Image (cartoon, grey):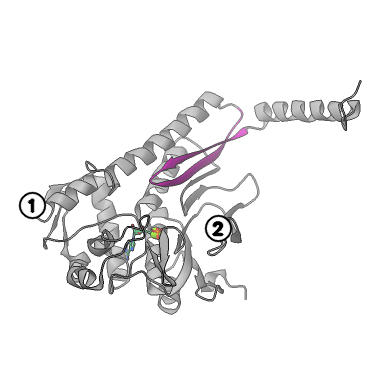
Amino acid sequence: MTMVGFNISMYKKLVLTFSLLLVCSTVCGQWYKESFKVMGTQAHVEFWLAPEQSIQIARVLIEAVKDEMHRIDKEMSPYKVNSLLSVINRQASISPVKISPELFELLKVSSEVSKLSDGAFDITFASVGYKYDYRASKRPKKETIASALSSIDYSAVILDEKNLTVSFNQAAIKIDLGGIAKGFAVKQCLNILASNGVEHALVSAGGDTALIGDRLGRDWLVGIKHPRAEHKTAVQIPLNNEAISTSGDYERYFIEDGVRYHHIINPKTGDSARKVVSVSIIGKDATYVDALSTTVFVMGLSKGMALIDKLSGYEAIIIDNQQTMHFSKGLQQN
Ligand code: AMP
Ligand code: MG
């Protein structure tokens, strides 16, 4: 007896394929992957282990990656009242707050990118940014923004390298690391995998992806979301050994009277940045790549592209308001 649409020769083929897969997984090594939720977004880890490495090692590495992401979230989340970030926001305008070396480093990088971009990237955007509630479609009144705007000022964040402390020299300052923390997190996770001998890996959190090596002789293909079609990809970028970060106005937003209010704030106005709709930055360092995608989003096409073209080791793909895609010099074919 044979099943409908299924005959013995198909069965033999299936058995053969399955056996080949089994032999290959022991002789050729294996891919391992897992997706999970963290930092209010979807994260993913995928890596290849050589044949002599067991599934137990893979499990340990996956757990280490998940733990690291959750650890960083616990330290840097603005939504957790006991996170170090929340403590800073409550205390730093009263007295210096002792912080971890990694958070100190991240605040230093933030300040560096603020200076580089003339304040387009500014973690004190939160002084106004926290007055928006995208889920509830709520935004601050014009007068509220106007009175809080002077508290967006990265130079008011004082870092004391010797004592490893941060303080604010203004009372109403708030900071938020949403524009840089996911890049830092994927970089940390990649370091964990690399220091355990992994040679082919991808770690992502939301729009931030970091890669070790290639996909066994082929490039990884990282998709950039279509900014106006939720489940579509605008373009796939072949990459290896690099990081890519995408900032888009479709991640957290609401529309009121035809105007899109979204989570990337222009520090000069306290309003959402609306010069472009999507910015992807490619480069070696996932932390900088993340900060720069937010930065270029605020700066817009001409100023943002000019910044990337002058920085060595970074490339950009910008989708403008008319949904035209623009590439930095290093990505253009001659
Ligand atoms: P990303 O998706 O990496 O562009 O990050 C967006 C997040 O960056 C927002 O949800 C905010 O937490 C944060 N952010 C918004 N505007 C700015 C800004 N001008 N400078 C730094 N961080 C920002
Ligand atoms: Mg970013």
Query: Residue 234's x, y, as percent?
Result: 59, 63
Based on the displayed image, in which of its 4 quarters is residue 123 positioned? bottom left
Residue tagged 2: 230
Q: Is residue 115 left or right of residue 58?
A: left
In reply to whether residue 211 is colored magenta, the answer given is no
At a point 55% along the width and 72% down the height, the residue shown is: 323
Of the pair 62 and 54, the residue shown nearer to us: 62
> Which stretch did the figure color magenta?
30-51
Evaluate whether residue 118 shows in this view: yes
Q: Is residue 299 above or below residue 77?
A: below
Q: Are marks 2 and 1 in contact (CB under 8 Å)?
A: no
Q: Is residue 22 left or right of residue 192?
A: right
Q: How many marks?
A: 2
Q: Is residue 82 left or right of residue 250?
A: left
- Considering only order in the chain, which callout, 1 or 2, is on the residue closer to the N terminus? 1
Q: Is residue 79 above or below residue 253?
A: above
At a point 22% along the width and 62% down the height, the residue shown is: 127
Q: Secondary structure at mark 2?
A: loop
Q: Amino acid at mark 2?
A: Glu
Q: Which quadrant: the C terminus?
A: bottom right
Query: Residue 173's x, y, as percent?
Result: 17, 60
Dominant secondary-structure state across the stretch colored magenta: strand
Based on the displayed image, in which of its 4 quarters is residue 259 positioned? bottom left
Q: Which quadrant: the N terminus?
A: top right
Q: Amino acid at mark 1?
A: Ser
Of the pair 291 and 179, the residue shown nearer to us: 179
Residue farthest toward the bottom in the current orientation of the protein: 302
**Residue at mark 2 to residue at mark 1: CA–CA distance:** 45 Å
Mark 1 beta carbon near ligand 1 (under 8 Å)? no
The numbered disc on residue 95 is 1
Query: Residue 203's x, y, as percent?
Result: 49, 45
